[in-house]
Amino acid sequence: GSIIKIDISGSGSGGRSKLDGFSLSDSRAMAVDENGENFYVASKSEIKRVKVSDGTTEPFLGDIGQNAEIVDIVLDDDNQRILVLEASSRKVFEVSTINPSLDLNNDPITGPSTPNTADPFIAPIKMIYNSNYQWLYVLDETLRSLHAVDLRKRDYGQGCLLYTSDAAD
């Protein structure tokens, strides 16, 4: 597929130009970085990084498996990661933007690893990420529902933390 760049700057006329260096068949999802310098494009089983200025494409995450099916990606610049919605496992995984790797058999951020029948999704198709609250919303086509996933980090090592008032009763 081709990507068309549209000039929307203050003085931009809406001029269009093709990013010549870009080439990726089976594009399924795309996410732009916070600075608008790069975007990430996912195919069924890999993700590439594309430079917006000239369309230069470089591998980001190689083939993650024959049965893999990436259906959506979301960039979380604050935590230097890409959230990957993978349909065959029905889970969301995180991939570091610094040192990218992904093992579909380990460490999903949604759903238990075993048994896989306990996964919260049946046919996940789309994600939206709210970075202010660190909530990930996952749309499930079969369940016809929107799941809210809280991605805030917590420390459960000491159990629940209770906050009490120092004021005298």
Image: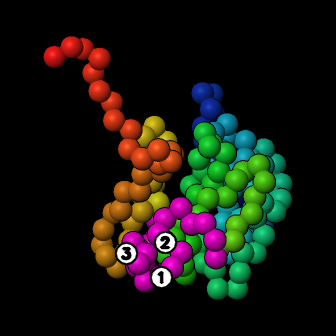
Q: Position of residue 67 (x, y in %)?
A: 64, 85
* Residue for point 62% across, 43% down: 79
The quarter of the image holding the C terminus is top left
Mark 2 to mark 3 CA distance (whole Å): 20 Å
The residue under label 2 is: 112
Q: Residues within 10 Å of mark 1 (few under 14, many from 20)?
A: few
The amino acid beneath tag 3 is Glu
Seen from the viewer's position, the closer of residues 74 and 115 is 115
Q: Position of residue 18 (x, y in %)?
A: 74, 55
Q: Quadrant of residue 62?
A: bottom right
The residue under label 3 is: 141
Q: What residue range appears in magenta?
A: 105-126
Q: Which mark is residue 115?
A: 1
Q: Secondary structure at mark 1?
A: loop
Mark 2 to mark 1 CA distance (whole Å): 7 Å
Mark positioned earlier in the residue sequence (2 or 3):
2
Q: How many marks?
A: 3
Q: Which mark is residue 71?
A: none
* Majority secondary structure in the magenta region: loop
The amino acid beneath tag 1 is Pro
Of the residues tagged 1 and 3, which is closer to the observer?
1
The answer to the question of whether label 2 and label 1 lie on touching residues, with beta carbons closer than 8 A, is yes
Above or below, comparing residue 12 to residue 165 in the picture: below
Mark positioned earlier in the residue sequence (1 or 3):
1
* Residue 151 within the segment the image draws in magenta: no
Above or below, comparing residue 118 to residue 164 in the picture: below
The amino acid beneath tag 2 is Pro
